[in-house]
Image (tube, helix red, strand yellow):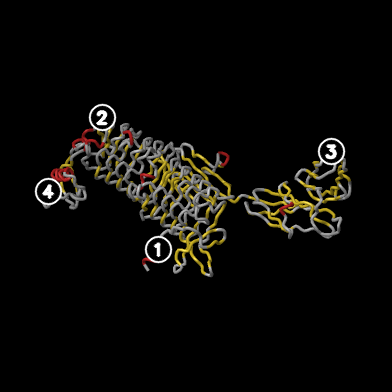
Amino acid sequence: MLVATLFMLMCGTATAYEFEAGGVYYNVISVDDKTVEVTYEKSDYEPSYAGTVVIPATVEYQGTVFTVVNIGEHAFYGCTNLTRVTLPVGLKRICGGAFCDCSGLEDVTIPNTVTTIDDDAFNGCSSFKHVVIPPSVMNISDRAFFCNGVETITIEDSPVGINAGGYWGRSFAFPNVRQAYIGRNCGGWQAPSSLIDHWYGNGALQRVEFGPNVTEIPYCMLYGDAYNLTELVLSPNIKKIDTGALSGCYALKRLELPDGVEEIGDGALGGGWGDKSLALTDLIIGSKIKIIREGAFAGCRNLQNVTVRRPDAITIPENAFDPQTYLTATLYVPEGCKETSEQTISEVMNIRTDGDEVDSLEWAYIWREYWHNLGFSEDYYSDTIYAYKDTFVPGYSEVKHWSNFLKIEEGEGATVTRWPVTIIAMGEGSVSALGREIRNTTYTHSVDEGTAVSVLLLPDEYVEVSELLLNGQDVKANLIDNSFTIPSVSSKDTLRVVFKEMEASLVIRTSEQGELEQMVKYGTSCTFKVSAAKGFVVHSVVFNDVDVTNDVQADGTYTTPAIQGKASLSVTFETDPSGINAPSVSSLRVLPSSEGVTVQGLTRGELISVYASDGKLVTQRKATSTTEYIALPAGQVYVVTAEGRSVKMRL
């Protein structure tokens, strides 16, 4: 049974399809489990799909209903004319190269049942604008998302981590991504370093947010050239910032490490490639910091203010900061913690002494430094709590290597006012803002005073923005290509976005008085059956001023193209000289439009007469060419006579 289960989840190497249903090709994975995968038509990977493809959750084959669990290897490979794909709920795996080089494919919604996305699955999908990884995905392999057009990436919240690195650690390459939301821990060999692929660099990235489930920013996650990143939002639950994790954030000017951060790794903000200097001027380190490793802030040569909120100083390596920082920046420490002081302490750091009694806090610090210098982690020498009274607590001015700062002051350093920005999204569409995709919900996040917040509105197909209110004021006129910017934030701001389906209607005109306007769903088609009364034949069918008479089927049915906005359908009839109720085959064509009538197939010199419905002559002229256009007032019924034929219509 175990073998059967594993086989079901593996991606088969299809050489040809076993059956076709609804224009989609399938291979059976397991008859016993009743599972299939989507595949291609021909064994040489010749593109099998174009336009819009809807993949069902189940499909029937030889009397058995199968569940679609995989998109097979290379199933849609190279289908450059593929524009939309609907993936079914229940899908488990998107196999290697499944959508590789589908350059025309627009954003794909990955169902929250997919667990694995294999090598090159979406590599080369250059029309992607937004990538959303649902909580169900556990593994993303090499080059799965190498997509040059992506502007936002969202890894949705989940308490379970994701292995997103593959063997080479490069699942993602988004050289033009502007915003990223990371909602879960990322693992894998150098996994997240490829989020902003340092081989390509990234000048577009402006904002990255880590959600509440993230406890670690891993190795070199933002090591690449994220040189325009100006906003970094850290989860309050982050405990560790690993080696080189933020070393590519050159434009970041202010960074507040949450109180939960316990460890800052080697070169965490070390300057990345080329030993570049970060623009960071203000740094705040939380109250629970335990370890600051070699070169942690060595790339921050522009620091002006360093605030440490921990009351009892920990020792740091001398190269934790650049030498220039010690000379020019001001170190801010909690009140009463600059100088060594005698005070009552109920609990101090956990200290391991291999059974030796510690009778003063001074010796506690000596033991801690002893084990630290031997290379042991703090977990090793921190397993016993000691309580002391009336003991000496070394101040920052006397603890290595905080004491290297020439300027040490007590209190908070430079502070920044933050204001809440609330985004409300309603209807069939989403809002990309503050690093999130917001859909039919309300999201609030605080930003630094003076920050401009970029908002991108993403209506669904055939949906438009009907309402855009900033603090109750209509700002829809300020939309440019569905983009809007909340200007410099200086108070609480609320942006309300409402989406609605685009309106569409079809006006049907015949030779009778009046017209029928039918409201239809935007983007849909309508089918009609055109028939003439006894003694008449259908002369022409015109859709949006285009002659579509030849598109009328033998049974008289006609299906319109997709209706977008207000459309019109005009049908004209003429007397049947043969007495047989059949379409005219004469070369004379009388085609109505919204402002007149076009008469085709004329003989030069032929008299053309136009009569009103009451028989009065409206206009008359001789043809000077084979085609004549006659302007007429709309909203009336006319009879046009020429070449011995009479055609009745309504404009």
Mark 1 → mark 4, Cα distance in angstroms = 60 Å
Label 1 Cα crowd, 10 Å radius (few <14 / some 14-19 / many 20+):
few
Mark 1 → mark 3, Cα distance in angstroms = 77 Å
Say if mark 1 contacts mark 3, CB within 8 Å. Answer: no
The residue identified by callout 3 is 624
Give the number of marks.
4
Q: Position of residue 327 (x, y in %)?
A: 25, 29
The residue identified by callout 1 is 7
Q: Looking at the image, is mark 1 or mark 3 nearer the viewer?
A: 1
**Quadrant in which the N terminus appears:** bottom left
Q: Position of residue 340 (x, y in %)?
A: 18, 38
Q: Is residue 9 above or below residue 259?
A: below
Q: Nearer the viewer, residue 555 or 531?
A: 555
Q: Position of residue 14 (x, y in %)?
A: 46, 58
Label 3 Cα crowd, 10 Å radius (few <14 / some 14-19 / many 20+):
few
Tell me, yes or no, if residue 390 can be seen here: no
Picture quarter containing residue 372?
top left
Q: Looking at the image, is mark 1 or mark 4 nearer the viewer?
A: 1
First in sequence, mark 2 or 4: give its number: 2
Give the amino acid at mark 3. Answer: Thr
The residue identified by callout 2 is 327
Q: Is residue 410 above or below residue 561?
A: above
First in sequence, mark 1 or 4: give its number: 1
Secondary-structure class at tag 4: loop
Secondary-structure class at tag 1: helix
